Image (cartoon, rainbow, N blue to C red):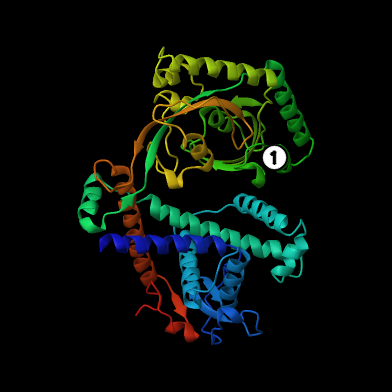
Amino acid sequence: MLLKKLQLKTIDYKLVLTMCFLLFFNSIISAQEIIKDVVAEKPVEATSVNKQKIDGIIATVGDYIVLDSDIDKGYLEITAQGGSVKDVTRCQMLGKLLEDKLYAHQAIQDSIIVSDAEVKSMMDERLNYMMRQTGGDINKIVEFYKKSSVEEFKTYFADILKEQKLSSEMQKKIVDAVEITPEEVRNFFKKIPKDELPTFGAEMEVAQIVVEPKVSKEDKQKVIDRLNAIKKDVLEGSSFATKAVLYSQDPGSSPAGGYYKMTRKTPFVKEFKDVAFSLGEGEISDPFETTYGYHIIMVDKIKGQEVELRHILISPTVSETALKEAKERITNIRNKIVNKEISFADAARTESDQKETRANGGTLVNPNTQDTRFELTKMDATLYSQVSNLKDNEISQPLLDTDDKGKKTYKLITVTNRIDSHTADYAKDYTKIKELALKEKQINTIAKWFDTKIKDTYIKIIGEYRDCTFTNNWLKK
């Protein structure tokens, strides 16, 4: 039954994470002294959240409180996100809120810092999203949260976001510290009864050759001039964050005003880190080039080995002539492979413009598992459409590919290996088994963490919520 238990725990854990996302609006943070017991009103059913009732404190965790209305807001948020609250009880909702409060409380005890700049960046990103949902009317958001003004809402929302960030950083700290040895993976696999071994779906290994159109010097200079003009505007008083939202082509940071927090160990490209750590606070770099395009960086704050910065990325436009030349080049490469003049792997090593795959003969690495196998049912839809009809060792025609930054390239794709659906095999599926074993260890570590911290933290649950059956020992029985 080990695997079944693991699967159940994994499902619960994912549910917790999903609820955490859905509830990020309604967790109320309060840095105030512990409030004495208040008689909580009888919990209402999920279908009755619109009834008038007196709000009250139903739980305290450290310096944080949970209001009865927090649970009601949780139901509203899940419904607003298109989720179903049919099977979510008030006790389950309270249990999740208590977890968030304990994570945030312990984060403060562990001196985890969430800066005002981080909160502001999160605020900008979330407000942009919510305003898109309401047609750009922030007053509708203020009304939804029953606040009297935009400023009151922003103050309230900033506290929510800070608590959410503290909670997530604490969770990350716990999980990141968990490591697993090959011996632990082996023991995990041995404990699974043969008739309960998982079945892995059909998979394939894929290789590709990428040819990038050459950008002319004139087009590069246009981008450099544009970035210099933006830099000049900022130096004259314009907002760098606003410019990033309007013009940056980096989807990961543009909605947040180009904001990133990084250390020298953060996995950014070398050119970016070199410039970032050469600047002083408030300084803006000259335009510089990476594999993604051209950037300018402004440093907001330096705290020891950590830098908070904003950046703008703009990539040069590729001309039709350059696209045509790239297609001709990749067609010639394909002809050489088809005519047996060179193998696909050797052509990838010598001709491909993609550094990440070139050394491995073009073999792709699955970003979700970090191995070379792609399960067909979980494969990216675009990649699946490109390889699904290829026969063994068949090479695709030149494919024009546009990434999420708008960058265009031509590529050839081939399937190098197919793995049929099969029962888990320790040797063949070590990476997947290791992932399952690590997840189980992480879940057990989190459970032990809760057991320890609940014992050491002031926790009070009042009213009829004391009759709840919780996963964790909140009642300290």
Quarter holding residue 237: top right
Q: Judge by depth and name the residue closer to the eye, 61 or 34.
A: 61
Q: Is residue 28 visible?
A: no
Give the image location of residue 207, x and y in percent: 43, 29
Quarter holding residue 343: top left
Quarter of the image with the N terminus is: bottom left
Q: In the image, what residue occupies the spot 41% across and 23% down?
A: 359
Q: Judge by depth and name the residue closer to the eye, 27 or 405.
A: 405
Q: In the image, what residue occupies the spot 68% across and 63% down?
A: 155
Q: Judge by depth and name the residue closer to the eye, 138 or 211.
A: 211
Give the image location of residue 356, x and y in percent: 46, 28
Give the image location of residue 470, x and y in percent: 40, 75
Position of 322 relative to 285 (above/below): above
Quarter holding residue 427: top left
What residue type is disc 1 on? Ala
Residue on which disc 1 sits:
244
